[in-house]
Amino acid sequence: MGGLVGQSRGKAGLRAWGCAMAGLFLVAGCADDGTPKGAASSGPPGTSATPSGTPPSAGGSGTGGTGASTPTARPGAATAIPMPPLDESKQPRTAAEARDLLGRVIIAEQDLGPQVVRSTPFESDPGRWPVLDEACVWQTEGLPDDVLATSTRHFHIPAKDGRGRVRISATVTIHHNREESGWETARAMEEVLRCPDQKLREGEELKSLWGGALYLGEQLNAWTEDAFSESGDYVNAQDGGPYPYTWSQAQFGPVTMAISAKAGQGVTNEDLTVFVAQGTSVMMIQAKQQLGKAAG
């Protein structure tokens, strides 16, 4: 399932996308054409090779700028753990079991950093499911047969010091099995192909979306069974735009975990990547701890 979907960006764009999507922290970064340089360790896009608990370097850990006004994830960003075998005996069989698992996987605001606060409303209706209609407008419907439980939590970083509001959401969905969660990722790819411009709600739109997917083992992806990300522009009738937008989804067994981030004025895509990587890392670690086979 690897490769680009959406607009073709040429060979250099493909290499750059692979570098970001491979789930790597590149100690020396990427070359100008996007190819890795230097040593690399496995982890979701943008995660730090600094051991958990080590403070970030002076000037803040936000990658898009310097100083206190730059958004920063919490110190000691999560690092990925090896891919354990799935323990199928731990998979939820009922909606109640799935909701219990979901609550142990999804993140809270403190997992993203001290600047991040809850939005209102905070959690989505657990009985509803987002669907992209034929006109490329997002609607909600009842849960489909292949979903046991799903929840989305909404957070934000308030506007401050000339930087606009950053909107972040975290979604966890529990399916019956790995095959169903894989199909969810495939549908996400199809949606970008079908609708590069999407209407979220009245006054909010995504523009010029493009995305890519990597299966386990592709481009050094060793942290998730399926990795899918999309990027584009976010336009808000109140705040203006276009501003950067990014979304990333990972999969372990019957569970999919996704983080989306929408920038405001003065916030870069690199700033967003810090929070997307942090949130995805934490949820993947928690899913592996809940559903993976114990070592030995």
Image: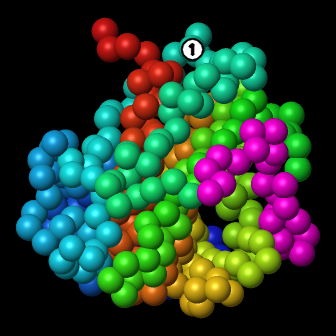
Residue nearest the viewer, comparing 274 with 70: 70
Residue 198 x, y percent position in the rendering: 75, 76
Residue nearest the viewer, comparing 189 with 159: 159
Residue 125 x, y percent position in the rendering: 76, 44
Q: Quadrant of the C terminus?
A: top left
Which residue is found at the position 61% from the left and 50% from the top? 122
Residue nearest the viewer, comparing 26 with 95: 95
- Based on the picture, tell me whether residue 107 belongs to the magenta stretch: no
Relative vertical location of residue 293 with respect to residue 282 in this rendering, above or below: above
Which residue is found at the position 86% from the left and 40% from the top? 144
Mark yes or no: residue 32 visible. Answer: yes
Residue 171 x, y percent position in the rendering: 60, 47
Residue nearest the viewer, comparing 277 with 177: 277
Along the horizontal axis of the image, is 13 left or right of 238?
A: left
Residue 178 x, y percent position in the rendering: 64, 31
Along the horizontal axis of the image, is 276 left or right of 69?
A: right
- Based on the picture, tell me whether residue 126 belongs to the magenta stretch: yes
Along the horizontal axis of the image, is 121 left or right of 224?
A: right
Task: Identify the residue at the far left of this view.
Answer: 58
Which residue is found at the position 28% from the left and 44% from the top? 79
State the SS at label 1: helix
User: For mark 1, does the 10 Å Cα neighbourhood hold few (<14), some (14 to 19), or many (20 or more) residues?
Assistant: few
Residue hosting label 1 = 90
Which residue is found at the position 65% from the left and 47% from the top? 123
Q: Amino acid at mark 1?
A: Lys
- Callout count: 1
Mark yes or no: residue 21 visible. Answer: no
Relative vertical location of residue 59 with respect to residue 283 in this rendering, above or below: below
Q: Quadrant of the N terminus?
A: bottom right
Bounds of the magenta span?
A: 120-140
Relative vertical location of residue 135 with respect to residue 46 in this rendering, above or below: below
Which image quarter: residue 37?
bottom left
